[in-house]
Each structure stands twice: as C-alpha cells, then as structure tokens.
Image (cartoon, helix red, strand yellow):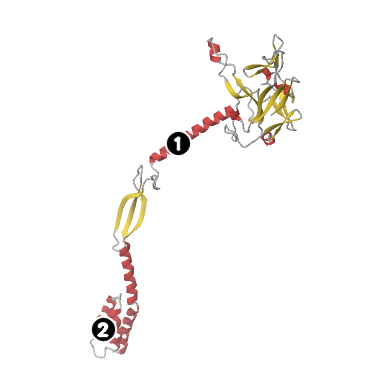
Amino acid sequence: MVAITLLQPISTIMAIDVKSISQLISEFRKLQTKDSITPESLGYILQRLADLLATAGTSETVANIQKLLDGFKAAGQAITALSQGQSDRNHIYANNTTVNLATGAVASSAGIFIQQATTERAGAMRAQQVTDLNNARRAVAEIEKILETVQVKLGMTDGSKGVYNNAQIQVSVDRGRLRIYGAAQLIADGYVPYLFRLTRKRNQWNDKVALQSGVERKKYCAVRKGWNLYGSCHSIYIATDNTIGFSTNPHSHQSQKAASYSTAPETLVTHHTRADGSQTFGWGRSSVALLDRKSKVNRHRMIRLRFAVGFAKKIPPGRSLVTTANLVSSLAEFSLIYNPTTKTWHFGK
C-alpha cells in the first residue's frame, strides 16, 4: 500500500530521471533469496524514488514552460548580429544574422537599412548631396572673401555692411555755430565724421597706362549727381562740446591734415573774383554767381547750399572713393545760406 501511494502521482509528474528509476527496479528484481527483501532494503528503494519525485516539476511549471515556448514561436526571429553592408551612393545597406526562436535555426541576409532622404521624408544623405553641400560651402567662402575685400576698400565695417545702421545723428544751429547730437558713441568707437555736399561732380581721370604709352586719355570721369564727399577725413572736426569745425585749408589741400579748424560758415565757401569784378564760388562742377543776373542794379541774391555730416571708418585720402554707402550713421543735414542784404553767410536747416 505504501508503494502504491507513493507511485500514484507519477502520472502527473514530468521531467523525472527515468533512468534512475529503471536502475532501482532492476536491483529490486535481483533479490531472489528468502528473507532478502527486508523492510530496510524496501525502505531504501522507496526513499530513492521519493527523492527523484521531489526533483520533478509540477504541472503548473510545465504549463509556464509551454507558454514560454509558444511565445518564442510567435516572436519568430531575433537579430543576433548587425554590420555595415555594401557601399552605395543613395542608400545605407546592412548585413544581419538572425536566429529562429522556435527551431534555433541561424540565417544571414542583406538589405536596405535606411533609404535616401527626399523632400517628403527624412533619410540618408545621398553622395551627390554631400558633393553639392561641399561645393556650396566653398562658394560661400569665396564670396565672403570677395565681400571682405570690397568692404575693406570701401571702408565698410561689420556694423555697417554698406547700409545705414541704427545710429541716428542730428545737426542743429546754436548761436551761429553747428552742434551735432548722437555722435559721442560713434567717436568713442573710432569712427570719424565726413562732410558731404549735394552736387554734380566729376573727378579727373587718372589713367597711368594711357599716360605711359602716350595715348590720348580722358580728362574727367563720369558725372556723379547726389551726396558727394567734400574734402576728406581731415575736413571736419568734432570738438568736446559737440561743435563742428571745418578745415581752413584751401579746397585743393583738403586731403591734407588741417592747419586749423574754424566754426565760421564762410569757411566752406571759396570766393573767386571775375574780370568784371563780380564774385563767384565753386559748387561741384558749377560756378555760382552771387549777383542776380536778371537784376539791373547788381543786386545780390539769396543762395542755399545743402550739406550733410555722416560717420564712417577712417579711410586715408586717395585710398578709395568714400560715399554714403560707407556710413555707419544717418546723414545729418544742414544748410549754408547767403543773405543778400548783409552779404554774409550763415548756417540754417
């Protein structure tokens, strides 16, 4: 009865070492003599069977294992290795090794891992796109070098880039003298003032090649109309009290350092006396007469001349043409007015 009770659960036990049980049964059958089967020998065999049964799992354990195996079968394959595939100009290929989780079979394959990028989706950059990008970078670098060269010749700065920036300046008339506002920071940053006139102007043509070869050369450049530079960076000076002084050098020596500066308005006008005794002054390409030619009594006429002040990087005279494109500030306009009654010049707006 004891043997039957212990052996009954064997049908529900799995994963028992059957070889060990068969060996015990064979040893039991070899006992042939009378009294050879004793309670001690029978108990030993039954104890060995009990120990083997204790190592076996239950039906619940088997169910869990079966559930795990079903999961492996459903999962299919797993990647065990991945490496760079063949080289291609448009796609990224990969070599992968997989294992079948149900059977353990190992397989290798190759295919597209990342497709090329398009305007509709992200992806791998094509080889041609890299070539185009490098060409664009080189082109931009060349353009930057050209712009830097042009800016240096024109006196442009990082702040100006050839257009007016936010520096706003203004000129006003204070007790007969000109005073400028908003220029303190520009002066502190190393910029200098320039004087412009609204004139028609053309410079002399300097053709060294034609001069050396003896070929007839042009005498003048093309006419420029608009705000033209008067003198050079030495023609105007800003005092500590913000008053504006003008170089007293003759017009032909405005490119040289000033011997002195004056706040008087007539400093900006150089008078010439004609053979008939009438006075004129130069204004760009024009020679302007003070007398009203329509008057029969030699009456003087009122004249208004437009000037302006602007700040830019200091450019030595003759280095390059200075225009309003070089300015890092706005143009601060003022007028020079001739009063025919008093025959004097004064500043105005």
Residue 211 in the image: state x and y as whole percent: 55, 12
Dot 1: element: helix
Q: Quadrant of residue 66?
A: bottom left
Q: Amino acid at mark 1?
A: Ala
Residue 69 bears which disc, if any?
Answer: none
Pointer 1 local density, CA inside 10 Å: few below 14, some 14–19, many at least 20 = few
Closer to the chain start, of discs 2 and 1, is 2
Residue 280 in the image: state x and y as whole percent: 68, 15
Disc 2 versus disc 1: distance between alpha carbons? Answer: 93 Å
The residue pinned by badge 1 equals 136
Q: Nearer the viewer, residue 194 or 157?
A: 194
The residue pinned by badge 2 equals 28
Quarter holding the N terminus is bottom left
Q: Amino acid at mark 2?
A: Phe
Q: Nearer the viewer, residue 16 or 100?
A: 100
Assess whether mark 1 and mark 2 are in contact (beta carbons under 8 angstroms). Answer: no
Q: How many numbered badges does the structure rendering display? A: 2
Furthest residue toward bottom = 35
Pointer 2 local density, CA inside 10 Å: few below 14, some 14–19, many at least 20 = some
Q: Is residue 43 visible?
A: yes
Residue 292 in the image: state x and y as whole percent: 68, 16
- 44 up-or-down from 202: above or below: below
Q: Nearer the viewer, residue 307 or 3?
A: 307
Kindly identify the residue that appears in the image at 31 percent across and 67 percent down.
Answer: 70
